[in-house]
Image: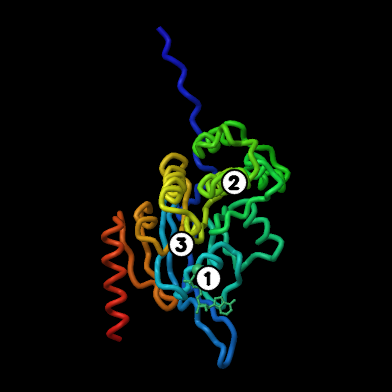
Amino acid sequence: MTAAPLAPQPQPHPHPAPTAIAAATTGLSKVYGSGEARVVALDGVDIAFREGEFTAIMGPSGCGKSTLMHCAAGLDSFTSGSVRIGTTELGTLADEQLTRLRRDRIGFVFQAFNLLPTLSALENITLPLTIAGRKPDRQWLDHVVAMTGLADRLGHRPGQLSGGQQQRVAVARALVSRPAIIFGDEPTGNLDSRAGAEVLGFLRDSVRELRQTVVMVTHDPVAAAHADRVVFLSDGRLVDEMTRPTSDRVLDRMKAFEARSRTT
Ligand code: ADP
Ligand code: MG
């Protein structure tokens, strides 16, 4: 008797850094402006994002969440400290190398879905590969598409999809080039709670099933509860961290921070 053939499994993640750290910052500082207009947006942030881990970044408006994400993703320069993606120090790269690293090793999901309106869902998903002149790994693409739950909508343009569907296309687009890390800045900020839950479920599945590393900025305790770990930022510094968060525990922690900042 022969065993039934197994369903094709996705290949292991292609960027196993020896350290198992997908990205890290050391003493990361970012100062905007000078003189009267000087703003210290990041003030010595040390953080590591482990491979296959889902991290949420939380903190009050203006505390530096977007700046941290942009600096860690090589989208923005920093004033001092260091950032690495895998074992590559971003500070050592020329502009062209940085552009290539962003394209090949980093995925992005923004609050605005940023899909191209004239392309179909499938064309949007494969766009990063098209731009890079790479052929999609068919099996991987099929797997990612299946995870979106949009197999019957692939020919639709973004305007023919709901917000949640559009953001799932954006997540699939981020996943398709198998980046070392995906950064999301408030990826559910424009969605109602049901559509948001679908997108968060998809992000979490990409971590569980594909061992994708994901870092997401959010102000929503329910969204943060989908992560493996929540880090709290305040005035450009990391002030706390929580593993295996629940929305109630995250909310309690946020309230405690607010109470403390009112008394100081
Ligand atoms: P968050 O995403 O947590 O709301 P940001 O990272 O956007 O916070 O901003 C952190 C701080 O840096 C804020 O005080 C903000 O006003 C300031 N800041 C952000 N971007 C700029 C910029 N381009 N020029 C000057 N200041 C900025
Ligand atoms: Mg922000």
Disc on the earlier residue, 2 or 3: 2
Q: Are marks 2 and 3 in contact (CB under 8 Å)?
A: no
The correct choice, above or below, for 47 with respect to 16 in the image is below
Whole-percent x, y for residue 36 in the image: 56, 92
Total numbered circles: 3
The residue where tag 2 is placed is: 173
Neighbor class of circle 3 (other Cα within 10 Å; few <14, some 14-19, many 20+) is many
Report the front residue among 77 and 235. Answer: 235
Disc on the earlier residue, 1 or 3: 1
x 43%, y 62%: residue: 218
> Going by the picture, which residue comes out furthest to the bottom?
36
Which of the 4 image quadrants contains residue 112?
A: bottom right
The residue where tag 3 is placed is: 217
> Going by the picture, which residue comes out furthest to the top?
1
Neighbor class of circle 2 (other Cα within 10 Å; few <14, some 14-19, many 20+) is many
Whole-percent x, y for residue 207 in the image: 44, 46
Identity, as a three-letter code, of the amino acid under mark 3? Val
x 53%, y 62%: residue: 84
Which of the 4 image quadrants contains residue 219?
A: bottom left
Neighbor class of circle 1 (other Cα within 10 Å; few <14, some 14-19, many 20+) is many
Q: Which numbered disc covers residue 67?
A: 1
Disc on the earlier residue, 2 or 1: 1
Report the front residue among 243 and 161. Answer: 161
- Going by the image, does 243 lie left or right of 98? left
What secondary structure is marked by label 1? helix
Whole-percent x, y for residue 37 in the image: 57, 88
What secondary structure is marked by label 2? helix
Label 3 CB-ligand 2 distance < 8 A: yes
